[in-house]
Amino acid sequence: MPKISQKGHNMPESPIRKLAPFAEKAKEKGVRVFHLNIGQPDLETPESMIDAMHNLEIRVIEYSHSAGIISYRRKLCEYYAKHDIHIRPEEIIVTAGASEAILFTVQTCLNPGDEIIIPEPFYANYNGFTTSAGVQVKPIISRIEEDFALPPISEFEKVITPATKAILVCNPNNPTGYLYSRDELEVLREIVKKYDLYLIADEVYREFCYDGRTHFSVMNLKEIEDNVILIDSVSKRYSACGIRIGSMISRNKEVMKTALKFAQARLSPPSLGQFAAEAAMDTPDSYFEKMINVYKKRRDTVVRELNKMEGVICPNPSGAFYVTARLPVDDTDNFCQWLLEEFSYDNQTVMMAPATGFYSTPGAGIDEVRISYVLNVENLKTAMICLEEALKAYPGRTQM
Amino acid sequence: MPKISQKGHNMPESPIRKLAPFAEKAKEKGVRVFHLNIGQPDLETPESMIDAMHNLEIRVIEYSHSAGIISYRRKLCEYYAKHDIHIRPEEIIVTAGASEAILFTVQTCLNPGDEIIIPEPFYANYNGFTTSAGVQVKPIISRIEEDFALPPISEFEKVITPATKAILVCNPNNPTGYLYSRDELEVLREIVKKYDLYLIADEVYREFCYDGRTHFSVMNLKEIEDNVILIDSVSKRYSACGIRIGSMISRNKEVMKTALKFAQARLSPPSLGQFAAEAAMDTPDSYFEKMINVYKKRRDTVVRELNKMEGVICPNPSGAFYVTARLPVDDTDNFCQWLLEEFSYDNQTVMMAPATGFYSTPGAGIDEVRISYVLNVENLKTAMICLEEALKAYPGRTQM
């Protein structure tokens, strides 16, 4: 039997999927599992998107342009302009989700062996794409004690080497929910300019900002236009994760020309999803206002209930729909598995994502979990009661 | 400005897209361009697929399982069983087109620097995926004089080295239309077994077989079950290229387990496309009978008309919807560009794919073109008249 590749061996397993078999078993036993482990919003997809499918008037599902349907890219430009991001259709490549946008970006910008700096904890799948491209992640730790703010410039400079090629940030952040301020982004700008690095920003949670705060895009950082690449997706924004429509955006002509060759090799992004995404562009602002309102209440519930629990620390982040919390347990990998395998309260339990999967520094995040607040407030409250009871009962509890 | 990657530099431009700007200009001048250059069938997508969209009953477009929706994979198993290919749902990963299936396969099975043998001419985008994975293509030439039949075993053995990891075939073939016989595939089996290689087969044109011949799948080669990986797609079969739904199939458990990690990193294949593809599984046999009939007439037209032209050689292939023909010209890259830039007959011209893009041996295929017969017979006849006139007028003609 021929061997599989080294890369295949090295590919990390998704930290979220690892627990799935245990959740299945819990359900088989009749236990209700609250899924706080995934980034799949429960809100309804805008009607306009479903309607676009109901009213589909094509007779052949054809390839689109490799960079995406031009009418969709034009509409995207209008959408971005509303967010004060001014770009042209040829600065966009429509991709199969943000995932493919990251893949194209890494392949276009980095050689195997190059280094990419990512503040950790970070979105676990970045590990997959960097492993698959043979790129080294250089993490710099953002601390729960500082609400996961951007580490100071000195921390970046400590890890910069001649092999450093890029900095990758997710803003608002998955898994911490932290919303980087304009000042923090200006710090990034300074580093990027000084060392001539790529600045790759995953802004898929752009709309998810709370407490009156607004999102500042890396696309508006001055004098580093050729360094910046924006990763985006319609998945979270329109509660449509299965649509697999994202985009890679840059004003750097050589980057876009090169990325287009990777895009051509896979022919085109999904056409049906593009039709739906184009229809979504007309979603009224009221949809987002309502959505933000709903998520803010959920965040408030989760943060309040978590901080009430003895020994639990949870920052109050201003973005996305995640919190990363510290729990008084020995090892959240064990704890999360135990929750599914051995625990139930009122025949209910909680599934969360152990944070070690979001760190690349070994041992980091061992007492942290990511909680996605993608359930309604009532269910979140019940889930928090479960968690509180579980913390009382867990044999590996570290403080009383 | 930071540099782009070496891989980005090396990525080939699509040989089909290179000519696109010249086609645009021809159209701007009011010239009608017959597109014989692309693999986009003109036939209608089955109604069941469009109906599935019209009748969509979901409220949230959710992620699917990373390996694809289970009900769809079960239906796929039934589809394959009809073609005497017996597999189980866990042996399938649903992908964003055959493109992603090839990407997962190459990443799972080959290390950078490994070698993959591909009979050439071959589907140009294989170059993209191998370049992107840092894998070396070792071409072995199949000759137009032999109708592009599989080269003898001795040709394979000449290029096998310790770095050889896999053989990739496309059957029926793009760009030659050649349908490998069972005997030829048994030859491949012998080599694969002797050297313990992966055998990767792209069978997206399975249904497109003419002259009463039937397709024999690599999945039915005995004793090499762990070596074989099948690449498939619904694009061509259902005239739905924009749907981006393919699959990677293998009985090798380790390969599938590893490929699933790559699949998890990109979360899920497109959901809307999967709904449509699942509906397509109920397409009646009559759809295919009609389709094969249509394509056979087209092939007959193109092959007959081409062979009537002085100095043109065109085999009569039994599969897919392509022919690769030899033309009496100095260089088909020049000729195809000239057709768009300088030639017209009755205000019409022809766009074809120069064959050099389908070879990796430098200079090979310089007097060949790939013609896709994806137009109706009447248009094909007119296009052939154009081509005949063009060959008379072209300054770089090599024989009279």
Image (tube, coloured by chain):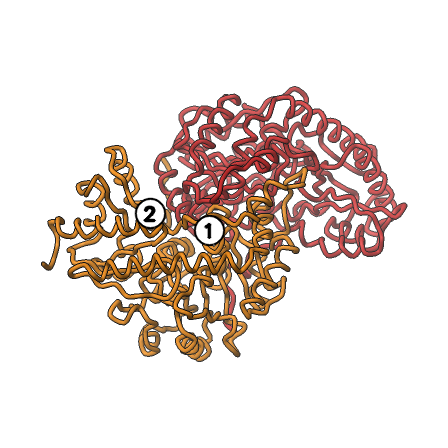
Chain colours: A orange, B red
Q: Residue furthest left?
A: A400
Q: Position of residue B159 (x, y in %)?
A: 50, 42
Q: Is residue B205 above or below residue A305?
A: above
Q: Is any atom of residue B225 visible in this view? A: yes
**Residue kind at label 2, given as amino acid type:** His
Q: Which mark is residue B330?
A: none
| Secondary structure at numbered mark 1 | loop
Q: Residue furthest top?
A: B212
Residue B230 or B395: which is nearer the viewer?
B230
User: How many discs appear?
Assistant: 2
Do discs 1 and 2 share a chain? yes
Mark 1 touches mark 2? (CB < 8 Å) = no
Q: Which residue is mark 1?
A: A239
Q: Position of residue A382 (x, y in %)?
A: 26, 48
Q: Earlier in the sequence, mark 1 or mark 2?
A: 2
Check the residue under mark 1 and report the chain it is in: A
**Residue kind at label 1, given as amino acid type:** Ser
Cα–Cα gap, marks 1 and 2: 33 Å
Q: Which residue is mark 2?
A: A9
Residue A160 or A399: which is nearer the viewer?
A399
| Secondary structure at numbered mark 2 | helix
Observer-side mark, 1 or 2, equals 1
Residue drawn at (35%, 49%) of the image: A6
Residue drawn at (60%, 63%) of the image: A77
Q: Residue furthest right?
A: B346
Direction from residue B65 to residue B385 in the image, left or right: right
Label 2 crowd (10 A; few <14 / some 14-19 / many >=20): few
Residue drawn at (27%, 52%) of the image: A381
